[in-house]
Amino acid sequence: MSRITGRRHRTFATALFAATSAVAAVLTVTPSAGAAPSERHDPEQKAVFEQTNDPSGNTVIAFARDRHGHLHEAGRYATGGVGATLDQAPIDPLASQGSLTHDPAHQLLYAVNAGSDTVTVFEVRGARLHRLQIVSSHGRLPVSVGVAKDRVYILDAGGDGTITGYQVRGRHLVAVPRSTRSLALGNADAPYFLSAPSDVVITPDGTKVIVATKSHNTLQTFRLDHRGAPAAKAVITPSAGVTPFALAFDRRGNLLVTEAPGTQSSYKVESDGSLTTVSAAVPNNGQQASCWAAVAGNHVYVSNAGSGTITAYRIAHNGALSLKDSSGITAKTDTGPVDLAISGDQRFLYQEANGAGAIDEFTIGVDGSLTRIGTVTGLPVFDGSKGPEGLAAT
């Protein structure tokens, strides 16, 4: 694996998004698997993790982060499951956000095994991982995991789509009884990538689960009871913009929604599960396939797979959004940017570039600007039928 500083131009032939288109507990408990770093273990080491989503054997690649924000491979860890690719997915095989999710409160990492209908639970030990558990997703094609407090929800994209809840107890997940709910999407078992739901999140107070449905153009909110079980039916909110994809929260708990044609909306989450629009599809950023988002301070960063760029939006105190840069371009990336991850100290942003087999490294300025500091290369590339999906940082 090599490193380059600055931008290396690559060519990669791939179709991209049509911008206006819109009670089981643990299955197995196993010891950690995969290569471990040779250097002495440092539990305080900061790290970034990428998921290969390989259909022949899913793996998480761990990178140690140095004090300058550069990444250095530190180990590879088998999840014990296999990856998958949604029908006609153009650059991101799972067409989702949150397929690899860090739980900082419990120092756990959750990795979906879309081809196995399972989720793997790792303990995070600095830049090392220890595999603890593999749990059922209770559906078909898990693509996203949401976390808040002691609650974890898994989103399955296959068929009607489902959510299923778990609770963190110690270092393990325990299934919430009778928590599986249908999204009633009416899709095929192996859905077309634009028809599949894309993201699941839990509100910061742990009281609601929200799902984005892409071409169905809705946001589904399930209220949770004291046990963490969802209401029988979702509160359905029509999306303010076309093809809602990525979900995130600002530091005041407003819901931020990234829409594929290049717009961004924000909502206040009401106690009854309804969503009140704050910003409705703010002016188009002029980029193509805006589908992944991450929040740092008063900015939300969006990756644009079809343009090889990142767009930053300012977040006002009330959750209103505006473009940081009038051009819509805050930074340029390598080919096919998909998942984003922000370091725990919010000093660095990492961009998974699926068309280049790379992770681009950026520092985050006090004004929200991004400065490219390097690139990790030699990683798996999306080849039209399989490729990586998922990025997380500590």
Image (cartoon, grey):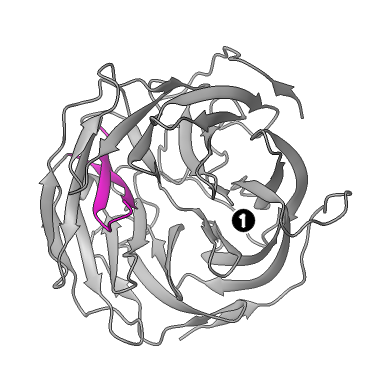
Tell me the SS state at disc 1. loop
x, y (%) of residue 86?
Answer: 43, 46
- 300 w.r.t. 184: above or below: above
Left or right position of 31 against 323 = right
- What residue is shown at x 88% (from left), y 54% (from top)? 40
User: Does the stretch in magenta take in 137?
Assistant: no
Residue 359's place in the image compared with 217, above or below, is above
Q: Which residue is mark 1?
A: 82
On screen, residue 306 above or below 131: above
Q: Nearer the viewer, residue 143 or 41?
A: 41
Residue 86 located left or right of residue 324: right
Q: Is residue 21 visible?
A: no
- Towards the viewer: 81 or 231: 231
Dividing the picture into quadrants, the one containing residue 133 is bottom right
Could you tell me residue 282's position as x and y percent? 16, 33
Residue 356 seen in this snapshot: yes
